[in-house]
Image (cartoon, coloured by chain):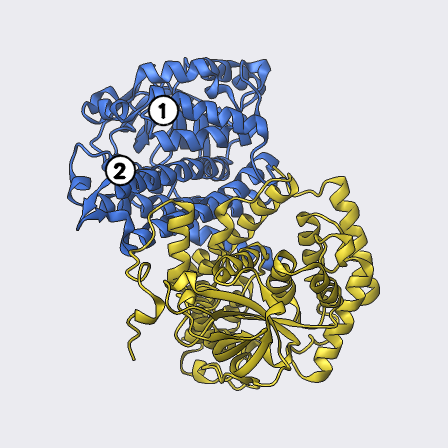
Amino acid sequence: MDFDFSDDQKFMKEQARKFLKEQCDSRVARGVLNDPARGYDADLWRRIAGMGWLGIPIAEQHGGLGLGQIALCAIAEEMGRACAPVPFASTVYFFTQAVLLAGSSEQQAALLPAVAAGDLIGAWAVAEGAGVAAPGSALGCRVEGGRLSGVKVPVTDGAIADRLIVLAQEGGQAGLYLVDARGGGVRAETLASLDPTRNVARVTFDGAPAERLGDAGDGWALAQAVLDRAAVLLAFEQVGGTDACLEMAKDYALNRYAFGRVIGGNQAIKHKLADMYVKGELARSNAYFGAWALEEGGAELPLAAAAARIAGSEAYWFAAKENIQTHGGMGFTWEADCHLHYRRSEQLRLVAGAPRLWKERLISQLEQRNAA
Amino acid sequence: MDFKDSPEEAAFRAEARAFLAANARPKGDGAPLAVRSDPATLEAAKAWQRKKAEAGFACITWPKELGGRGGTPIQQVIYAQEEEQFETPPNVFAIGLGMCVPTVMAFADTATKQRFVAPAVRGDEIWCQLFSEPAAGSDVAGLRTRAVRDGDDWVVNGQKVWTSGAHFSDFGILLTRTNPDVPKHKGLTMFWVDMKAPGVEARPIHQMSGDREFNEVYFTDVRIPDSQRLGEVGAGWQVALVTLMNERLAVGTGYGPTPEELMALARALDLGGRPAMADQAFREKLADWYVAAQGLKFTKFRTLTALSRGQTPGPEASIGKIVSANQMQEMSAMALDLADQYGILNDPAEAPFGGLFHRNFMFAPGLRIAGGTDEILRNIIAERVLGLPGDVRVDKDIAFKDLPTGR
């Protein structure tokens, strides 16, 4: 039994935590929060590229570190803890995973070195408005003669991305398409969002040159496969965020005096924090299984990803809202950092599909497994 | 990150499996053994324990000279995982070997250890733990059973409660109050006691579930020689902490229905023209329970990993009972709900799974209380894991006899 990060991975995780503590305290997130037009913190992004983290899942032949998915999970947890205002998830959990999964060797050779070097911000453009499109349903984004037209919204990091991966329809078949966001025929406008520390845009395509990623007709299946991978990595961000909220709440409860003693001595607070801990551990254990399934890349992944996503979403949301409650009135101010996590927890809960969807997916998977 | 055994672990697992295959029958191969404590079941339990002890699978982590194997915690867990797959008689030794005898080993003299440890390992003698009282549950240090010195003996009067297995136990460890004039934690003393001694009487408790699995134990002028004292006079609380620490090391198994059992039920039940399994509200709840059950399973794997690496497990193991007891209650309630008014019936001939869900429904309230209530467990997590302060203790500087007691 060896169900934990290895010593090397733990060391890397520790280094990442130290780095982010120094380089990404809450002032960094606030810099973007107070000026959403910036979209992300470009200095931090460059330094993260310098650490090599963007290349963790990318093979050395493509300029990456080739350390695999579990090492990436370890870093994801620390990114979540730090509430980092950078397009790490879009670029590494979505864009890179899609290229690794579906890209031809030429596409991989062309794109992955730029990602690993920090020269390419990627984004994932699938949604077309409110609600949930059923897999296989008609898409508004169409490709004809290698040109893409239509509108995607919301696109996380859409206004700061260099390349987009777009789910679109060509001759009645859905596929994934690579589009140069800096090229012609692409217009991105930042929209106001709950969590401005992660950019959200409406992206309008008007005859933008598009190159297919993966086979024609595989669009929906590939999109789901990318989502499964991203769900595990996002779950680690949620685990890190949960931990950060619990730490904040604990520190406050140990230092805030009311009725002649610290509020952390009251059972109403103690039990609330104990519940945060319990949910956090359930999320961590589910995330670990997700990490294992992600690295194995086998049939276990869809179920493991769903479980990791559901547990991570529940834990971070609970911890973020109860952290504010523990802080009392102070927690409701702009100055307190509690709302950074409240915003981020909701962003993470929804960005890869709401838990309600994942619960349905999990049960369908269980039914299929039982029928088999 | 993987689930594989190390070569040594795999070899041990194979050995355990071979022993079990030769001596027990796999689960599902015939009817399950009844969980009872009648004389025949007890005899079977003792015979099984003897067989395990002779093969070195009882008390795996204990030294060989005390009847153990001199093995590792991970071997203990591997054996338990393997044994779970076989029908074995009810383990009536768990409390004795998990908590009582380790306390005897830590505090008794050599002669006493030699007299008691080996027979307990072999299953010849069963031990119970006599701590809780009607007025001392979560606040066990508030217990009132009095031990008064009389020459070389102590004379004990009082009542214990919720004692598992008292009616078939040979010995027990007994926490008493020897000095009511000092604050409550300082006036306690621990003894071992012969459950057949004059004045000891065990009476089964009729539980709300209808079962009688626990006992009240009455002590009336029971004479206990001072040589049966464990630890110093007045140091009973420190001794009890050793017992309870061993409780925390015991590896528990899952409780209650599994999500798969609930799914099987939901597929078979019709809810207004479609199976309950098609009900969206049910599917969402089921997903939550599945995720929590998986979370507990993989949390246990994390604990095993620490053991396998020779490390002390982290505090994550403390979440187990608080999650599973509540889950048992909610899942069994949902199972009854799905049957609609038919869910009221718990006649084993009528109720699905022979009334499994109904039994869980009626047992769950007890599980949320036994071995640390939900509230005490949250306190423990808050204080020992998160480092939050203890509760205000209005009783800590007051002599026990002066504490307010209510009715």
Looking at the image, which is closer to me, A371 or B231? B231
Residue at 76% x, 42% y: name it.
B8
Would residue A160 appear left or right of B279 to someone viewing this image?
left
Mark carried by residue A342: none
Q: Are marks 2 and 1 on the same chain?
A: yes
Q: Position of residue B182 (x, y in %)?
A: 37, 64
Q: Earlier in the sequence, mark 2 or mark 1?
A: 1
Q: Three-letter amino acid code at disc 2?
A: Arg
Asked if residue A102 shows in the view, the reply is: no
Give the chain letter at badge 1.
Answer: A
Where residue A48 sits in the image (x, y, percent)? 41, 18
Residue B311 image point, x, y percent? 60, 40
Task: Please tell me the colour of chain B.
Answer: yellow
Kind of residue at badge 1: Lys
Residue A359 in view in this figure? yes
Badge 2 marks a residue whose secondary structure is: helix
Q: Residue at x 66, y 53 (%)?
A: B77
Q: Looking at the colours in the rendered structure, which chain would you say is drawn in blue? A: A
